[in-house]
Image (cartoon, helix red, strand yellow):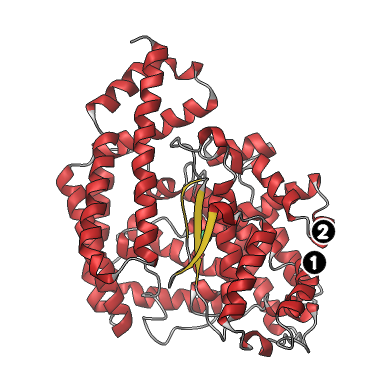
């Protein structure tokens, strides 16, 4: 085969992998929403079959032959093909270095540990989960050894797995900058006399009305329901097999209207990203969001930067009054804005406000760093966790269930994942600052012209999918890589105004 023919065969081969992934994605959505409980075992068997197929295709001799044959020609490829090659090569190398029995052991341990974690959290019993956590960390360290990238520290390798190009050096600088800004800001907020009225946020809103509002707001901000669907699940998520089928979920609670409202805004951010990837790459492996951090930047943009802004509430207020007559009669637009931005130190990460949320992430990052770089004993975790909550948030969890056991991530071996949440918020602020240079964002929100905002994001971020690494994408679209200054300025300005702080 000449190069042209090899490229054609390589593309077709990757296209096959993508098709399997698309099928798996839709099956997984089915499993998490409407699949009957009795089908659990048979679905697990089916999922196992597809995972093995994809694993075999990704690590086959045929794949190696393509990668070797094309290696000398990568420089001549267009950007999309370069991206495809980069992803296929990374996945081949990562997966072939680790012996099959270790992969299987990890899979089984994750499955078991996640189930035990659920019980341990329900029973508030950290010691029950601790031996599993210990084994997960040991096994993860073994996997890192097999990968043989000795020039990188173990935790650096994990951070890079979840966000290409990230490491402790960048995160340390980012988190130190955040801490220096947030900790004193929080203290000022605590000492301020500003009182925020939040009594109305738990006002009852009927489920049918909430569903109607979800659809309306989703459509308004640019989620295309012809290529989307809003379902219900315990934990909201977004699932896209390709840009033509991107579904989201939320959960409804009569006494917590804002919870579903903001879940929908958040998941719509993810969905709008996937829906606006270029048609040309829809069925290619580059045809989904660039990275965890960039994906989260889109959800946080819609949820927080747009959805928790004063201008947005000035517009939404009238809509909401029409949609929910009498419910919020005595509440003003400004009260809405204040209530959805109230800052309050709390134990649970997923319920935290925009400002303290980062401290929850920093605590997890610092603990993961200790686990992988300093070999600390997992049995010391509850004490370390509680001390850090006291140091950063001034509160101590009274149980491990609302402390060290609250998140599911570690139970499935996801170490190095948490920092991408904070990174996403910071990317969102950086992207929004650039948006303001090109668009009169305030005026567009006032005119409810959310399409202009979506189109701009589509042009700068969405269309490319995974063609570029996060750093390449930021550089290409904004001329600079990650910069935390934008986020620190955004938080400082927003909360100084909201709490009427004088500097
Ligand atoms: Zn998200």
- Please determine whether, in this image, residue 194 is positioned above or below residue 30: below
| The N terminus sits in image quarter | top left
Give x and y (percent) for residue 383.
37, 77
The foreground one among 186 and 40 is: 40
Residue tagged by mark 1?
Answer: 311
Q: Which residue is at the far left?
A: 101
Residue situated furthest top in the rendering: 2
The residue depicted at 83 percent of the width and 59 percent of the height is 447
In which quadrant of the rendered view does residue 408 lie? bottom left
Furthest-front residue in this view:
226
Is the distance from the Cβ of mark 1 to the nearest ligand 1 atom less than 8 Å?
Answer: no
What residue is rendered at 20% in x and 55% in y? 45
- Left/right of residue 244 with respect to residue 489 in the rendered view: left
Whether residue 181 is visible to the viewer of this picture, yes or no, is no
Residue 317 is drawn in which quadrant? bottom right
Could you tell me residue 10's position as x and y percent? 37, 24
Frontmost residue, 443 versus 431: 443
Q: Residues within 10 Å of mark 2 (few under 14, many from 20)?
A: some
Secondary structure under tag 2 reads: helix
Q: State the mark number for residue 59.
A: none
Q: Nearer the viewer, residue 370 or 273?
A: 273
Q: Which residue is mark 2?
A: 442
Q: Residues within 10 Å of mark 1 (few under 14, many from 20)?
A: many
Asked whether the residues under the numbered discs 1 and 2 touch, taking CB atoms below 8 Å apart as contact, a structural biologist would say yes
* Quadrant of the frame with the C terminus: bottom right
Answer whether residue 496 is visible to the viewer in this image: yes
Report how far apart the C-alphas of labels 1 and 2 lie in the structure. Answer: 7 Å
Element carrying mark 1: helix
């Amino acid at each position: 085969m000449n190069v042209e023919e090899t490229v054609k065969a390589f593309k077709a081969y990757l296209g096959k992998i993508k098709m399997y992934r698309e099928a798996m994605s839709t099956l997984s959505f089915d499993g998490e929403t409407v699949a009957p409980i009795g089908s659990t075992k048979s679905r697990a068997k089916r999922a196992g079959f597809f995972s093995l197929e994809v694993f075999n295709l990704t690590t086959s001799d045929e794949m190696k032959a393509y990668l070797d044959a094309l290696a000398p020609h990568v420089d001549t490829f267009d950007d999309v093909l370069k991206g495809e090659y980069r992803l296929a090569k990374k996945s081949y190398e990562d997966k072939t270095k680790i012996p099959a029995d270790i992969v299987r052991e990890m899979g089984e341990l994750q499955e078991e540990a996640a189930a035990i974690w659920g019980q341990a959290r329900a029973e508030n019993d950290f010691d029950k989960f601790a031996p599993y956590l210990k084994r997960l960390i040991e096994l993860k360290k073994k996997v890192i050894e097999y990968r043989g990238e000795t020039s990188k520290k173990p935790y650096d390798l994990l951070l890079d797995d979840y966000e290409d190009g990230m490491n402790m050096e960048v995160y340390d600088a980012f988190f130190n900058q955040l801490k220096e800004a947030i900790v004193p800001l929080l203290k000022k907020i605590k000492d301020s006399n500003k009182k925020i009225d939040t009594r109305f946020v738990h006002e009852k809103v009927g489920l049918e009305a909430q569903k109607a509002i979800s659809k309306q707001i989703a459509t308004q901000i640019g989620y295309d329901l012809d290529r989307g669907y809003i379902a219900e699940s315990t934990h909201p998520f977004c699932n896209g097999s390709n840009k033509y089928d991107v579904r989201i979920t939320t959960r409804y609670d009569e006494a917590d209207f804002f919870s579903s409202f903001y879940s929908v805004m958040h998941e719509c951010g993810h969905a709008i990203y996937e829906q606006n990837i270029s048609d040309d790459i829809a069925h290619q492996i580059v045809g989904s969001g660039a990275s965890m951090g960039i994906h989260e930047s889109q959800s946080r943009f819609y949820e927080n930067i747009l959805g928790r802004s004063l201008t947005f509430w000035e517009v939404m207020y009238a809509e909401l009054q029409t949609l929910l007559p009498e419910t919020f009669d005595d509440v003003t637009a400004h009260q809405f804005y204040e209530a959805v931005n109230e800052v309050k130190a709390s134990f649970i990460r997923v319920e935290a406000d925009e400002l303290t949320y980062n401290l929850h992430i920093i605590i997890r990052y610092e603990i993961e760093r200790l686990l992988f770089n300093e070999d600390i004993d997992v049995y010391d975790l509850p004490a370390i966790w509680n001390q850090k909550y006291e140091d950063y948030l001034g509160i101590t969890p009274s149980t491990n269930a609302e402390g060290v056991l609250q998140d599911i991530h570690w139970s499935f071996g996801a170490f190095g994942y948490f920092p991408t949440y904070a990174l996403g918020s910071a990317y969102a602020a950086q992207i929004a600052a650039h948006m303001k240079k090109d668009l009169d964002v305030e005026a567009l929100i006032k005119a409810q012209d959310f399409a202009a905002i979506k189109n701009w994001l589509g042009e700068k971020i969405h269309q490319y999918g995974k063609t570029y690494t996060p750093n390449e994408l930021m550089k290409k679209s904004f001329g600079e890589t990650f910069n935390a200054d934008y986020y620190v300025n955004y938080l400082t300005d927003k909360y100084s105004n909201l709490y009427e702080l004088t500097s």
